[in-house]
Image: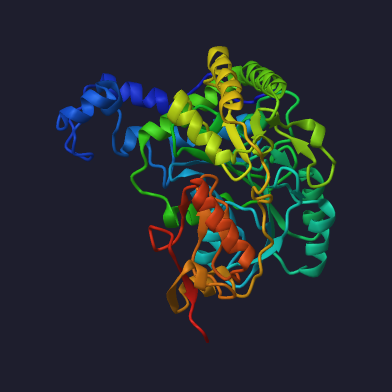
Amino acid sequence: MRDYKLNQDRAPIYEALKKYKSNRIVSFDVPGHKQGKGNHELTEFLGKDCLSVDVNSMKPLDNLCHPVSVIKEAEELAADAFGANHAFFMTNGTSSAVQAMVMSCCKSGEKIIMPRNVHRSAINALIVSGAVPVYVNPGVNKHLGIPLGMAVDDVKRAIELHSDAKAVLVNNPTYYGVCSNLVEIVEIAHKAGMKVLVDEAHGTHFYFGKNLPVSAMSAGADMAAVSMHKTGGSLTQSSFLLCGKNINEGYVRQIINLTQTTSSSYLLLSSLDISRRNLALRGKEIFETVVGLADYAREEINKIGGFYAFSKELIDKEAFYDFDTTKLSIYTRDMGLAGIEVYDILRDEYDIQIEFGDIGNILAIISVGDRSREIERLIAAMSEIKRRYSKDSSGMFDHEYINPHIVFSPQEAFYADKISLPIMETEHKICGEFVMCYPPGIPILAPGERITKETLDYIIYAKEKGCVLTGTEDMNIEYINVVAEL
């Protein structure tokens, strides 16, 4: 475990809220429910204790936009725990942290190197900022049909061809748990004078676990967006933005304050504070248990047959450089079912909610709150699904990642004049909006990309199988906005 310099037993925001609550303050500020007294149904549902600390920024509780006391102390403790130079508390989700990273390093017209299988938040940042992407196509495992990480040689080639780029953005780990060679990518990018930004939404545990892939800060990255709520135990929408020593903290805060709410939830802030303390004090033991549960589930599911819960055996030290063993990623297509179909069966017939299902895989997130009995229930359900639903797999869609054909920058296409066309009439047109399955929120099409038959086939197949498609202006995903002919 990391040798901490500060007293990680402290939780300053939590402590300040407890003191505020004990003082029995009479509130003539917002929020208007006044500690739950004005909304009895909400108080009954969420609990009086919860509503009593859903409060506004004030001197004793500090202000997230300009922290000088308890939030500042909590930021320092978080930075210490994660091995960062500074840590920002984010209450607009990790999406806002990803956008802050990009916007802190890239201005309008400047280039950023990134994999195409980024979360939509990264491309949203390009639309807002006007930065221009240089896409590195990720590796692909053709059997599983999933995109992997970025191979070092591909990143090196992109840096050589685009030496004027300002930053390199890396997904680490990917949604499926695949990691790139982050240490070497950082070294190459820094030699070229570029910052390295890491979308580490699914990697909170890398900072506290044992024998897990390297964390962004340990690898020397400049910034990392970390979803504490995904695997670290904090409330949904709460995250950290970590910064290394070569980042201007004051400027980053200004960028964050362009879009982050001025009414940050103290429920979210205190959950970050308490969860950081929990992981700093007990993270090693917690994630040792998590890895054990995931490894056990993989072993038992692979015994069932028909499913393939993959792991480190696929490491090739290139685009599949390392693997996050807390991820329970399972290939389903060999038994004749798309991942989304298994997802639906688990939820509808077994009352088991997993993270997502795509065309060929499902993902179950194993984290701090899981116990052996839930793992056994999942294994039993998977065994029954194999027995009841297994069928011939011929004719199933056999790939996931489609190389994009970039014509315009995301900002140019998003703000261009557009027309709405039926999906099947859009082939060869330039997409003016997003089309994606959510989760995971990785665009099938992004603004500025040419629409191909391959892409359309994938969208139609995903719809037929029951994937939740989002991103288009048309809520029924029957029409796509395309850039008007110039």
Residue found 32% across the figure and 37% down from its top: 59
Determine if residue 123 is in view.
yes
Determine if residue 355 is in view.
no
| Residue 409 drawn above or below residue 144 | below
| Residue 89 drawn above or below residue 128 | above
Task: Tell whether 129 sits left or right of 297.
Answer: left
Q: Quadrant of residue 189?
A: bottom right
Nearest the camera: 124 or 305? Answer: 305
Residue found 46% across the figure and 74% down from its top: 415
Task: Tell whether 58 sits left or right of 360.
Answer: left
**Colour mode of the rendering:** rainbow
Q: Position of residue 87 (x, y in %)?
A: 56, 40
Q: Position of residue 173 (x, y in %)?
A: 67, 40
Nearest the camera: 237 or 252? Answer: 237
Q: Position of residue 179 (x, y in %)?
A: 73, 41
Residue found 56% across the figure and 74% down from its top: 430
| Residue 155 drawn above or below residue 44 | below
